[in-house]
Image: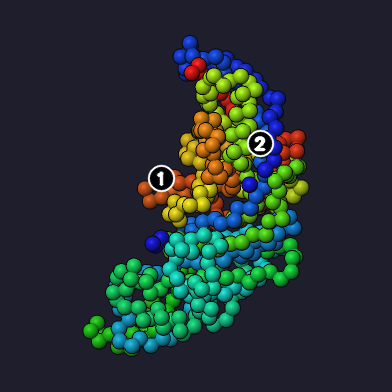
Amino acid sequence: MILAAAAAVISCVENDRTLGEGMLPDESVINLGVKTFDLPVTNQVSDSMQAGNTVTMLLGTVTDPVFGTAISNTASYVLPYSDTTDFGESPRLLSAYMTLSIDSISYMDENQKGIHQRIRIYKLTSPLDSTIGFCNSITPDDYDPVPVTLSDPVIYGEGEIRVDLTEAYAQELLSTTPEEFADVDLFLEKIHGLYIEVQAPLGTAEGGRMNYLNLGTSTININYILNNPDRGFTDKDTTESFAFGYSSAFNYFSTGSEHLADNAPAEELYLEGLSGIKPHISAAELKDMLDSWIEESGLDGSLIILSRAELVFPYSTPEDYGRFDRTHPSAIYAFTRDPLATYSEGYYAPLESVYTAYNKGDINRSLQQYSMDITSYIQNLILTDRDNIDGTYDLWIAPLTSRTNLADNVLYEVDNYNYSTIVLNGPASERRPTLTITYGLMER
């Protein structure tokens, strides 16, 4: 536990080649070719997204004139550093405080780096598990409405702030038994963690800031008088520390870009991180586009073998390079979404080809585009019967991130903890989103 469409238009770019001798038997190869299609892409809102990550708590609010307002609240575990603590007989509380460590920030404009943001911190009444594992699943029923702080703290960006805690919350920590210290599961049954809520912005003024609290950098300190005759302690001034933000963070975010949803986008495509607007590609329309090309080209009797299938999303020269550098995602990739997936499997998952792709959607500044290899997905789509194509095959283009697990394996995931925005070129642009396939033909 510790954790929807525009009609597809086929472009005229086709270039037959005679490359790849030796890859297939000579008597089977008819030709090799390259075909570029205009993408049947729309703009849709990516509503429910997994909340958990193993990197950082995201806290803050940003208002953009194009995308609207994004807000992120956050939660994580409270755990003791020690597994052998014994508070003794009737420990007497002296003081209790939290040190919140804001390790980094993101913002649109320099003048927003140090603005004040008021927060409230609440005690969770439900465990952090799959029941509240999506960005929009936490409700007031999941936390105590009385804050655990003596006042509403204000944060100003990077650095540490001290937050005094209520006696009631401190006493709850002081009532932890040695058995609960020794057993993490027992501890978590009692202490569910904390939820931090940021005050929503007043009005619609542009600006704001997102704050990143990396796991393992924020602490809770309880100062108390220890009496434990069995261990020879009498009226001993003692401090016990707990980690706030351990193993996993759960970011509960909302975005305001619903107004940008469009089934027939023209010059622009919008991409917002977290649960915001995303380029969306209907697998059914993509399949129809490919099947039409196969039929019109007289390739029905051949087996099409792809050596490469590449999605390209160009963007135009930014007006403000400073803001662009601060807000654009460094990599985007194609994700599928399974509404029936359990939390442990994830909700938005990158195509498996990301692990073998020669191009994983990194930004190319010289070409002003993102490109991504999705060869195995397109090959599978060509070979799958149209009647079997449903919404689980649809593609969502979202920011991509990676992490290394304890076994030193690199895992690729949707980036649900960095806030980013970018305006890409739309289907009506001169440099528009495309799918290019490099293929060979074999006689069936």
Quadrant location of the N terminus in the rendered image:
bottom left
Q: Residue at x 50, y 67 (%)?
A: 75
Task: Examine the rendered structure and indicate whether residue 132 appears above or below residue 240.
Answer: above
Task: Examine the rendered structure and indicate whether residue 355 appears above or below residue 20.
Answer: below
Residue 39: mark in rendering: 2
Q: Amino acid at mark 2?
A: Leu
Task: Examine the rendered structure and indicate whether residue 292 appears above or below residue 402.
Answer: above
Image x and y of residue 235, in percent: 33, 88
Q: Nearer the viewer, residue 253 or 410?
A: 253
Residue furthest to the front: 387
Q: Tell me the element at label 2.
A: loop
Q: Give the quarter of the image for residue 296.
A: top right
Q: Nearer the viewer, residue 98 or 189?
A: 189
Q: Residue at x 38, y 74 (%)?
A: 190
Image x and y of residue 47, in percent: 59, 56
Image x and y of residue 308, in percent: 55, 28
Q: CA distance from mark 2 to mark 1?
A: 33 Å
Q: Residue at x 57, y 66 (%)?
A: 73
Q: Residue at x 31, y 78 (%)?
A: 177
Residue 409: mark in rendering: 1
